[in-house]
Amino acid sequence: MQIKEQLYEGKAKKVFRTDDPELLVVSYKDDATAFNGLKKGMIAGKGVINNRMSNLLMQRLEKCGIPTHFVKQLSERETVVKRVSIVPLEVIVRNIAAGSFSQRYGVKEGERLAAPTIEFSYKNDELGDPLINDHHAISLGLASADEIETIKKYAFAVNEQLKVFWAKCGVTLVDFKLEFGRLSDGTIVLADEISPDTCRFWDSSTGEKLDKDRFRRDMGGVEDAYTEIMQRLTNHL
Ligand code: UDP
């Protein structure tokens, strides 16, 4: 397989075409953004950690019957993935109240929810990724009713698998964001990444944050937190 020209550069990754029309290569950067691109910075070594973590977790999920875009890791920062058209929804699953959920509903950060919950944001930078319900998503033609059902089923299954895995690593999976895509035949697969950029990870005993909130909230120790969470994962492979 040959890597061809860059198709797209996002906030955290670059995407390249290959000589196979069904495969792309993603390259993870150290750039970090928050608040819809308002806050910009760098987290040294983040690209290497996110690439490796996302690939390891997606391989685990595949074994549990959740289809993903993962094909093969090429290098520290580069991975071959299946080409998908991204469903323009951010799919957020929560176990514990935090961030925007705490603010919106007046629930103290850290409160365990009575049951895991799910929400969608419409992926649209100009609109600031507004919260959207599944009926709106269907009415706007972002996904079909069947696709929404499949996405919900996979998202909750991902949560069950990852919650148990991270618990073994001494980490509480607070919440996370997923993105799904369609293969050329329409099959829905998990895409994008699963990393400290897209999940809230809290140390189970101390509550210490081991994720991008340290960057968003100027808490310091960002690189160390990424290194620590990666170490927890590799210790439990
Ligand atoms: N998240 C993400 N990208 C976004 C928004 C949220 O990866 O554009 C993740 C975030 O890391 C957290 C979860 O989704 O794990 C829930 O985030 P929340 O809605 O609380 O938003 P935030 O408080 O981060 O703005």
Image (cartoon, rainbow, N blue to C red):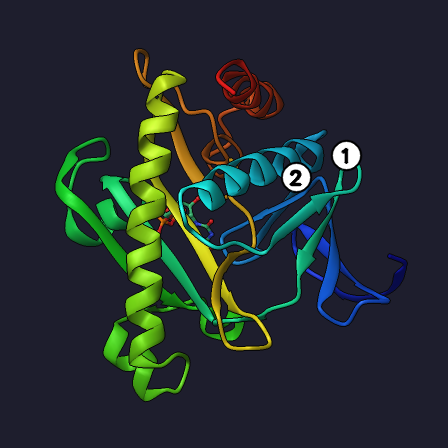
Name the residue located 32 percent from the left edge and 12 percent from the top edge.
206
Alpha-carbon neighbours of circle 2 within 10 Å: few (<14), some, or many (≥20)?
many
Pick the residue in front: 188 or 135: 188
Query: Is 7 located above or below residue 31 in the figure?
Result: below
Alpha-carbon neighbours of circle 1 within 10 Å: few (<14), some, or many (≥20)?
some
Q: Residue 44 in the image: x percent, y percent?
A: 72, 30
Q: Residue 221 in the image: x percent, y percent?
A: 56, 20
Query: Is 119 located above or below residue 34 in the figure?
Result: below
Q: Residue 71 in the image: x percent, y percent?
A: 66, 50
Does 43 sit left or right of 182 as displayed? right
Name the residue located 64 percent from the left edge and 34 percent from the top edge.
52
Pick the residue in front: 215 or 97: 97
Does 139 sit left or right of 108 as displayed? right
Residue at disc 2, secondary structure = helix
Quadrant of the rendering where the N terminus is positioned:
bottom right
**Residue type at the position of mark 1:** Glu
Residue at disc 1, secondary structure = loop
Pick the residue in front: 132 or 100: 132
Q: Is residue 43 visible?
A: no
Distance, label 2 to label 1, CA atoms, is 7 Å
Q: Is residue 217 visible?
A: yes
Query: Is 15 located above or below residue 209 in the figure?
Result: below
Name the residue located 60 percent from the left edge and 76 percent from the top edge.
184
- Report the residue marked by disc 1: 76
Query: Is 158 located above or below residue 104 in the figure?
Result: above
Q: Quadrant of residue 98?
A: top left
**Residue type at the position of mark 2:** Asn
Circles 2 and 1: CB distance less than 8 Å? yes
Q: Residue 192 in the image: x percent, y percent?
A: 56, 54
- Report the residue marked by disc 2: 51
Mark sitting earlier along the chain (2/1): 2
